[in-house]
Amino acid sequence: MPRMRRKQDLPQKTCMACGRPFAWRRKWAQVWEQVRYCSERCRRAGPASGTGGDA
């Protein structure tokens, strides 16, 4: 059985919605390249944009 990796050794990305860093998770192993958000809440919120509608 392979040894466990430490959390700091895992690849990281920055969330497109909140800007916080998040680490690789096993459930994302097959789709890591497509993962953009750290959580379901951030995915629903979408990317933070400066368009407030007062253009």
Image (cartoon, rainbow, N blue to C red):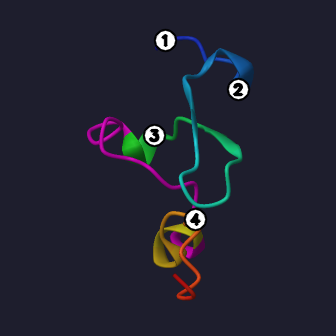
The residue segment tinted magenta is 29-41
Marks 2 and 3, how far apart at CA: 12 Å
Are the residues at dot 1 and dot 4 in contact (C-beta closer than 8 Å)? no
Amino acid type of the residue tagged 3 in the rendering: Arg
Are the residues at dot 3 and dot 1 in contact (C-beta closer than 8 Å)? no
Q: To which residue does mark 2 refer?
A: 7
- Sequence-wise first label, 1 or 4: 1
What residue is drawn where x is 58% and y is 75%?
Answer: 41
- Residue 21 position by quadrant: top right
Dominant secondary structure, magenta? loop
- Sequence-wise first label, 3 or 4: 3
Q: To which residue does mark 3 refer?
A: 26
Q: Where residue 43 is drawn, which disc sits there?
A: none
Residue 9: x and y in percent read: 65, 15
Marks 3 and 1, how far apart at CA: 14 Å
Amino acid type of the residue tagged 2 in the rendering: Lys
Label 3, secondary structure: give it. Answer: helix
Marks 3 and 4, how far apart at CA: 26 Å
Frontmost residue, 51 versus 11: 51
Residue 3: x and y in percent read: 58, 11
Of tags 3 and 4, which is closer to the observer?
4
Of tags 1 and 2, which is closer to the observer?
2
Q: Where residue 48 is drawn, which disc sits there?
A: 4
Q: To which residue does mark 1 refer?
A: 2
Name above or below for residue 50 compared with residue 6: below
Residue 13: x and y in percent read: 55, 34
Of tags 3 and 1, which is closer to the observer?
3
What residue is drawn where x is 53% and y is 35%?
Answer: 24
